[in-house]
Amino acid sequence: MAGEGKKQKKPQKYVPKYKYYKVDAAGKVVRTLKNCPRCGAGTMMASHKDREYCGRCHYTVFKEGQAKPAASPAKA
Ligand SMILES: [Zn+2]
């Protein structure tokens, strides 16, 4: 009778690999992340809001056009 205690495991939150890929309108699989120019193909760079970062060599690329000056002159 006893024995199998039904333990409810909490659903673990994990990031699926396919997050890094998406299928475009033409049904073509495209990578959403860039490869690191230093580490070469196979090493993807993490995409942040305003930059891309390689966790391997710590290479960081700031996205152009989105960079705003940190201190904007306030009108007095
Ligand atoms: Zn790298």
Image (spheres, helix red, strand yellow):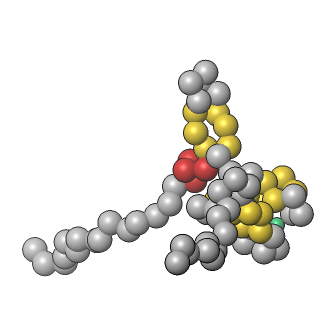
Which residue in the rendered view is the most extreme toward the top? 26
Identify the residue shown where x is 74% and y is 63%.
62
Which residue in the rendered view is the most extreme toward the front? 76
Q: Where is residue 49 in the image (x, y as percent from the top left)?
A: 59, 61
Q: Where is residue 42 in the image (x, y as percent from the top left)?
A: 79, 55
Q: Where is residue 39 in the image (x, y as percent from the top left)?
A: 87, 63
Identify the residue shown where x is 87% and y is 58%.
37
Q: Is residue 43 left or right of residue 23?
A: right
State whether residue 15 is above or below residue 3: above
Identify the residue shown where x is 68% and y is 43%.
31
State whether residue 24 is above or below residue 4: above
**Could you tell me if residue 40 is visible in this image?**
yes
Q: Position of residue 69 (x, y in %)?
A: 67, 69
Residue 24 lies in quadrant: top right
Residue 71 lies in quadrant: bottom right
The N terminus - image quarter: bottom left
User: Can you tell me which quadrant of the image ligand 1 is in?
Assistant: bottom right
Q: In this view, does 33 lie to the left or right of 6?
A: right
Foreground of the two, 26 or 13 = 26
Foreground of the two, 62 or 25 = 62
Q: How many marks?
A: 0
Foreground of the two, 31 or 74 = 74
Q: Is residue 25 left or right of residue 52?
A: left
Residue 5 lies in quadrant: bottom left
State whether residue 17 is above or below residue 4: above
Identify the residue shown where x is 52% and y is 55%.
16
**Could you tell me if residue 56 is visible in this image?**
no
